Amino acid sequence: MIKAKYTVAMESIIGTRDEQQDCAFTQVDNLTAIAVVCDGMGGLESGRTASAATIAKFKELHEKKDPAETYPAFFLKAVDILDEFVFHLKDENGERISAGTTLVAAAIESNNLFWLSIGDSRLYILRGNEFARVTRDHNYFLRLDQMRREKEISESQYQAESVRGESLISFVGVGGIEVMDLSNAPFNLLPNDTILLTTDGLYKTLSDEEIKHCLYIEDVNESITALINTANEKALPFQDNTTCVIIRCNEEVFPNEAY
């Protein structure tokens, strides 16, 4: 039996919320891997509908992807389709549900990683002792920080506005996405590299060091269980839905030139 180049694990918890609004999708074969994580918003039913519909539509688009099309091109095309699709979602009465969802996606082929992010779900890469977040949180803080750097607002204005700093300014379903993170150049993966996709329920509960500690576990299934259990054990009064996907590059099946 030929071992796949990439090992993938996925797990979710509902936290203290009334309903699970996160949704995720993974697909891995001997040479490639794809993962998508969404965090719905807009009320109980609406948030769940938006995230599930986005995942379903993404899978449909990915199944029709031309093998010759690059992932950056595919992601860029998918963004508009997904945003339009969710923006026009309707309830059983034919009324627009006014919902949305974050989206973070990772695609790997030929040892190259590409990603897309809209909202505040995140993608991290662990390589040896280096642990880096490669996506931004597309919330009001992003604009506030820019305005402060460019001295467009005073420090007192910044502090006053920061009370709504975590409000999203970009998400699937907003009706015209202007802010996203899209990797146009490939990130070359090395043996043992670990990619983490997660909703905000994880990083708002655990520190970077706590996340790293769990990702160091060799078995990816044990690693993701440790992440979820550690978050759950915090028992925060308002613990959000938490969904994680881990992709691990298997050392023994990488070509020598990858080193």
Image (tube, rainbow, N blue to C red):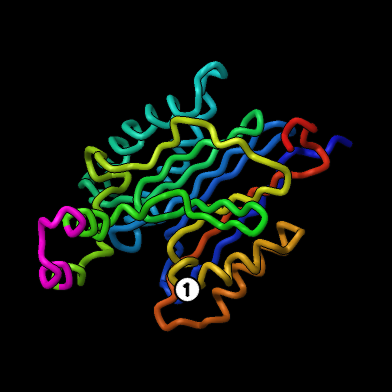
The image shows residue 5 at horizontal and vertical percentages of 74, 38
Which residue is located at x 34 percent, y 63 percent? 44
Residue at the spot of label 1:
205
Position above or below: 227 against 77: below
Quadrant position of the N terminus in the picture: top right
- In this image, 217 relative to 23: left or right? right
Q: Nearer the viewer, residue 136 or 103?
A: 136
Quadrant position of the C terminus in the picture: top right
Count of numbered circles on the image = 1
Q: Nearer the viewer, residue 101 or 126?
A: 126
The image shows residue 209 at horizontal and vertical percentages of 57, 70
Q: Magenta includes 157?
A: yes
- In this image, 111 relative to 154: left or right? right
- In this image, 152 relative to 197: left or right? left
Helix, strand or loop at mark 1: loop
Q: Nearer the viewer, residue 48 or 131?
A: 131
Position above or below: 234 against 179: below
The image shows residue 210 at horizontal and vertical percentages of 58, 72
Q: Quadrant of residue 250?
A: top right
Amino acid, disc 1:
Thr
Which residue is located at x 31 percent, y 32 percent? 80
The residue furthest right is 1
Which residue is located at x 20 percent, y 47 percent? 95
Position above or below: 204 against 153: below
- In this image, 78 relative to 193: left or right? left
Q: Magenta includes 21?
A: no
The image shows residue 205 at horizontal and vertical percentages of 47, 73
Q: Point out the stretch of residues depicted in magenta.
A: 148-159
Q: Quadrant of residue 48?
A: bottom left
